[in-house]
Amino acid sequence: MVRQAKAQRMLTHDQIWAALDRLAARAGLSPSGLAKRAGLDPTTFNRSKRVTADGRERWPSTESIAKALAAADASIDSFAKLIDDDRGSGRGSVPLLGFAQAGMSGAFDEAGLPTGRGWTEIALPIGEDGQVFALEISGAALLPAYRDGDIILVSPAAPIRKGDRVVVKIKTDEITIATLKRRTAKTLDLAPLDASQAARTVAASDVAWVARIIWASQ
């Protein structure tokens, strides 16, 4: 009689970090926001901390996971379910890039969809829109609207109306976030998120694409 041994599946580095991303998204937080709420260093769960400078995988500690679960009011059983769960509840993995890198040539195609290198993935609420991507804010340039470590979800397919917050890609590779004041066939009138800064008008011929921000972590 031949016995077929069941192969024990090992948890992977990517699965554990993806589960932490999903835990943060379920709580309406970015990974850094979850770390802050857990009383940890805000960069504890950042993508930059997941691999060492020499390319070795860095795993989250059991202590940091325990604190994250407490901060998100979640159990270890619910965390286990998040490890492989990228379906249901309107959540899934979407492409993620740092906002500072988003202006690089080749990061997007002509339609404003992710392309090229540098993109990773993060679990966020995506609904029925399969074209969305996420940008991670860095620094304080977009305060008070967005803080360092916040995640914004951007949809190139979503309709844009006056008053929407948008991501605008200029053909010179500049990328900016602003509130749309008016859009005509010839110009885009943009209001900066910082009210102390002056409004800006951009010629439509200079714009590569415009996409609406449909969600942001808090």
Image (tube, rainbow, N blue to C red):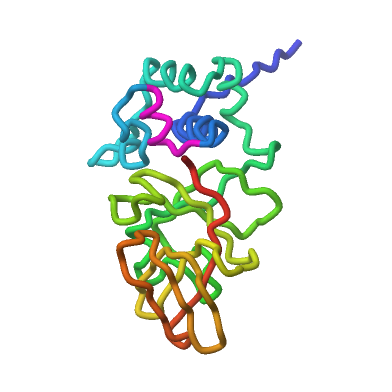
Q: Residue furthest front?
A: 196
Q: Residue furthest left?
A: 53
Which residue sits at x=40%, y=16%?
A: 62
Magenta part of the chain: 29-38
137 to 207, vertically: above or below: above
188 to 94, vertically: above or below: below
User: Residue 169 at x, y = what percent?
Assistant: 43, 72
User: Residue 124 at x, y = what percent?
Assistant: 56, 43
Total numbered circles: 0
Q: Nearer the viewer, residue 88 or 169?
A: 169
User: Residue 150 at x, y = what percent?
Assistant: 41, 45
168 to 18, vertically: above or below: below
Q: Residue furthest right?
A: 1
When asked about the image quadrant of residue 142, the answer is bottom left
Residue 130 appears left or right of 76: right
Q: Residue furthest top?
A: 1
45 to 48, vertically: above or below: above
Q: Is residue 31 magenta?
A: yes
Which residue sits at x=50%, y=44%?
A: 122
**The N terminus - image quarter:** top right
Which residue sits at x=23%, y=41%?
A: 53
Provide the major secondary structure of the magenta segment: helix
Residue 185 appears left or right of 118: right
User: Residue 81 at x, y = what percent?
Assistant: 62, 24
Q: Nearer the viewer, residue 199 or 62?
A: 199
Which residue sits at x=50%, y=72%?
A: 181
Q: Is residue 170 magenta?
A: no
